[in-house]
Amino acid sequence: MLLVVWATLLHPLRHLDFWWHLKVGEIIVENGHIPTNDIFSFTEHGKSFVHQNWLAEVFFYIIWKVGGAELLIFVNTLLMTASFLVICAVAAMRVNYSRFHSLFMLVAAFSFALYSNLRTQTFSFLFLSLFLLILWRYYFQRGYRTLWLLPVIMMFWVNIHGAFTIGLITLILFLGNAAIEYALLRQDERSAILKAQFRQLIIITILTVVATLVNPFGVAIYRSVQQVMTDPSSQLFVTEWQSPRVTNPEHLLTFFIPFFSVLLIFTYSQRKPDLLSIGIFLLFAALGLTSVRNGIWFSIAVIPIAAWYIEETPLQSVFSRIFRSANSISRPKFTSIINWSILGALVAMTILLNPWVRPRLGIEVLRPSLIDPRIPVGAMEYIEREKITDRIFHHQDFGDYMIWRLWPQQYTFVDGRVHLFSYQVVRDYLDALSGSHWEEIMTNYNISYIFLPKPSRDEMLPLLEAIQQSESWKSIYEDDKSVIFQRLVPSVYQSSTMSN
């Protein structure tokens, strides 16, 4: 658990997929309504846009107003830790939880650690974990009373994150399994209690589906989720929407190691998984193979199931011998003192890592900045101070913070809302970065400034190299993170503005 806690505490507020949500939350709280069109970019300004995450955005902004970045990181840690504890509770549902199971749950802990940055998706980790806990309790213990929590959870989930559809599909999978089991029973085995519980599950499923419509957009919420999942710009541009690669170390930790671990456990366990467990495995394996961002769902849903079967694999006897050997070693007289000292050190480390203490220590290895150090805050301050309002072509990594810091003084070219932007806009953006007919693109979009990250030791953006060799642009700002260029020859847009 400490792996999840420490990783989350150390995660700064990232440069992508957070800051624009915070700005939307501010707009909703201050103005009392949810925007229905794009108001942040100049490339898609006015285009219809569904703010499906509106409730999470309001939640983010309120927390920001109350306690700033520190409280946001702390709340994120609570959400991640609660999610992990819930899936541990699912893992302990059918077994006597032991050190062996705790060791295996490290597989899920690594996935959680790598997905621990604050996003609206974080809420879905907890909601899916709760859904699975409630549904598995019903499956094993016939605890149908807690099923009534599912529609209530769904009313919040549908207004927070698009992964509510995963919860809905999971519920329908449990219902389908219950229908198959009920159909296979002989007539004399279908007791009144079983019939009542099956009807209860049907009613809960219907109510949960109805609960998805309790949102400001009605049935259009489904079209919004479908558009995000199938958006060609996202597939082209966003790595996490692409299929995972086994050669990528991060993809190995978040999906392939959990996937092959579960596959081996199911294969070598003396007790084979039932139909529902196999169905859950296939569903979430398919999701994980579809895109990088879905790897975490596999760990949440399937790792706890594998924990039920791992004790009946050859690994159990191996680790049992190891643990017995460890227990047979004579312990020093001051064992309890040593244990309490270790516990004290772990607590002290957790205190040092908390967001109210860590920045004041100034220790680089502890990541003292609560805001992603890649964000060029100094350049944003320069743009704000110089009252630059003409159009800026900027790196996508800068777009989200530009929305938070500079809107409505500035509008973005592209930002973290990739599914908003047309394929042509994304294609032009990528072509410009690669240095391909970049001057034509700047002219077509009436760009007056170009805002790029400083080159790393390993690579330099072709666009940055091309601008430095051009006589039509000059550098007006530069620091250790970014550089801003201004067009020397007025653009078409500037000329028309001056004429007016």
Image: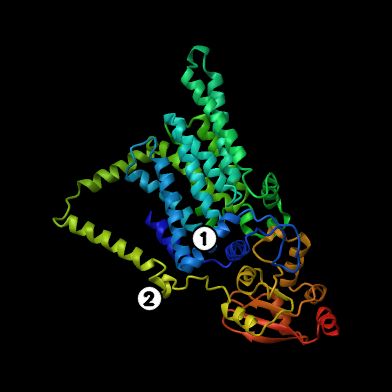
Q: Which residue is mark 1?
A: 118
Looking at the rendering, which quadrant does residue 97 occupy?
A: top left
What residue is drawn where x is 71% and y is 65%?
39
Image location (x, y in percent) of residue 409: 68, 76
What residue is shown at x 52% (from left), y 73% (from top)? Answer: 373
Query: Is 261 displayed left or right of 161 in the figure?
Result: left
- Report if residue 245 is visible in the image: no
The residue under label 2 is 361
The image quadrant where one finds the C terminus is: bottom right
The relative height of residue 460 versus residue 256 in the rendered view (above or below) is below
Secondary structure beneath dot 1 equals loop
Query: Picture coordinates of residue 315 (x, y %)?
Result: 38, 41
Farthest residue, direction left = 333
- Residue 27: quarter of image: bottom right
Given residues 217 and 465, the one toward you in this image is: 217
Give the mark nearer the N terminus: 1 vs 2.
1
Camera sees residue 137: yes
Vertical placement of residue 417 versus 196, above or below: below
Measured as percent of width and height from the top left, residue 335 is found at 18, 55
Q: Amino acid at mark 2?
A: Leu
Residue type for callout 1:
Leu
Query: How far is disc 1 from disc 2 in space, using C-alphas?
Result: 23 Å
Numbered label tally: 2
Per the image, label 2 sits on a secondary structure element best described as: helix
**Foreground residue among 315 and 470:** 470
Q: Quadrant of residue 101?
A: top left
